[in-house]
Image (cartoon, rainbow, N blue to C red):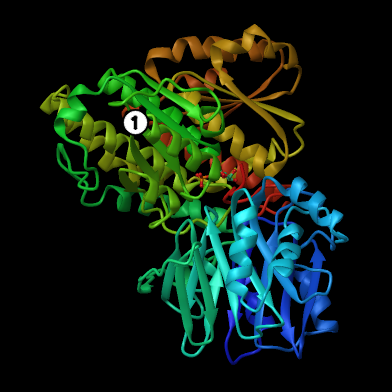
Amino acid sequence: MCGIMGYVGPQQAAPIVLEGLRRLEYRGYDSAGLAIIEGNGITVRKAAGKIANLDAVLSNANPEGTLGIGHTRWATHGPPTDSNAHPHTNMQATFAVVHNGIIENFADLKAELEESGVEFVSQTDTEVLAHLVGQYYDGDLREAVRKAVDRAVGAYALVVMTSHEPDHIVAVRMISPLVVGFGEGEMFLASGVPALLEHTRSMMVIEDGEMVSLTADGAVVTTIGGEPIDRSPVDVEWDVEAAEKGGFDHFMLKEIHEQPEVVAETLMGRIDGDHVDLNEVGYTDEFAIDLRKIWITACGTAYHAGLVGKQLFEGLLRIPTEVVYAHELRYSDPLIEPGDLVIAISQSGETVDTLVAARLAKQLGGRLVAITNVPGSALSHEADDTIYTRAGIEISVASTKAYVAMVVVQYLLAMDLGQRRKTLSAEDQRRLGSGLAQLPGALETIIGHDDAIARVAETLVDAQDIYFIGRGLDYAVVMEGSLKLKEISYIHSEAMPAGELKHGTLALVTEGTPVVVVLTQEATYDKTISAVQEVKARGAYVIGIGYEDDDQLDRYVDEVIRIPRVEDLYAPVPAAVPLQLLAYHVARLRGLDIDQPRNLAKSVTVE
Ligand code: G6P
């Protein structure tokens, strides 16, 4: 998704802005640009494609100046071309803006501006803001931005500079994230913490509905309306190393390898033998006892984590649970009622679809528990209770460690609710507790089989379509396995409950069609094997993922990937890992851009 970087201080701004944008590359983008105050004017440089293209443009004509703003764009309005890349300026090029998010009423504003004689040079919604600020300017940039923002409807972050005030940057946050970095006699602004880490640890998150104005000496924060806000910067502990690959070829592989530690970290201090201690949740025992309905809302991988959660809450707690895509929840007139528990899951905590659904759930009276990986994220501000996954910064667009952490947190949440409702026996609690404690070791073992999984991946490299099947919790996990594969390998894949295959999709299975089956659930094992036989009878090439002590599997499938024996309830955690590695190796063998797959973004901050 789009990235923003800004700088004002004594140094040359262009290299700092460019480097900041590079640190945000992992969010996904398709063009980049920057604007620098140079002499009495504004110089804009931009280029479609990777930041390297912008770098090449700059190396021929590097603007000199100590204030600048930059942007990586992920196209929404208009294709990824040089002219649609940000920054955008007014006609006199005296104002430049960069913007994340969407201006929903841009068409009306554009028509109005065109009537007043403005000529547009891009197809973006953003350009209207540059013209509006220019028209409203009357010697005070803050006032002009305020008036422009007053006219704009949408969820966005906007950053503005002008040659009339060459030492001043003004920014506004309406949902899309913005962070200010405090240096010595210099100030930074970005859409994400990683862009700022090499310059400073002292940061301030700008909240929704706030405006910040930066000069080299500091930041002034107000509401958009102008009410003063008194907030001090905080020290951020993330280190730059964490944002580097640490010896692995790709962030994705590094993050897969981090999973044993991540699960251990996620559990740390939250479970003691048979007792779960989730001190971050503030609901009462009475709330848990009276609970009749759980909703889970999320998108993408987080939604798949929610599919596992549904089976836990229903299986362990016998509480009806619905999992709804966040973008669907909003428009489905959901039957959420006071007393319902709504769990919003989001790695980034910034996915706008999830934020909006979470807000709606709260308005309807649901108690909102956020499960997120990013401290201080927008979702955590929305929520009544936030449980952090502690997976650490995740850079690869394809989520891995955050997924397992999101699943593990739901085990803890289910146990916490069961404990309060007194529906889990001491024996159940003990068994569940010791099952969780085994997970880091199980993940370690699977990661040790990486070479074998890479060999299996070779059989999939030239596939056109791959089918993933499983039942119950295995179905939840193959949904994620299929998404992982298609995201990064660009091979079409579909996941379905094993029993559903014969009701249609079996028509597509012919000689050599690859089918990946996960078989960890004893209750449905034989039935899933029947589905395997059905696809084998049509010539499918079957890869089976099962427990190390499953001595039947070899008989039915062509390739076996083994995972350590865990209780069936916990199988989604270890079973996810070979699926991640399979996707990774297929994409690697196909020579693709694994960490930044085409058309995708790490955090989708538009609806
Ligand atoms: C994007 C990412 C996915 C992610 C989804 C939800 O589409 O590419 O990997 O699962 O957003 O993100 P969240 O941060 O809310 O978990």
Position in image of residue 502 (x %, y %)? 63, 8
Rendering coords of residue 574 (x, y %):
42, 37
Residue density around tag 1, few if under 14, some if 14–19, many if 20 or more, within 10 Å: many
Give, as a three-letter code, the residue at label 1. Answer: Gly
Q: Can residue 563 be seen in this view?
A: no
Ligand number 1: quarter of image:
top right
Nearest the viewer among 186 and 578 is: 186
Q: For residue 570, which quarter of the picture?
A: top left
Task: Label 1: state its secondary structure.
Answer: loop
- State left or right for residue 124 relative to residue 184: right
Task: Give x and y (percent) for residue 253.
Answer: 55, 54
| Relative to 525, 82 lies left or right | right
Residue identified by numbered label 1:
366
Q: In this view, does 153 lie above or below 295?
A: below
User: Which residue does the image show at 55% across and 37% down from the upper left?
Assistant: 300
**Viewer-proximal residue, 381 or 599?**
381
**Relative to 160, is 257 on the left or the right?**
left
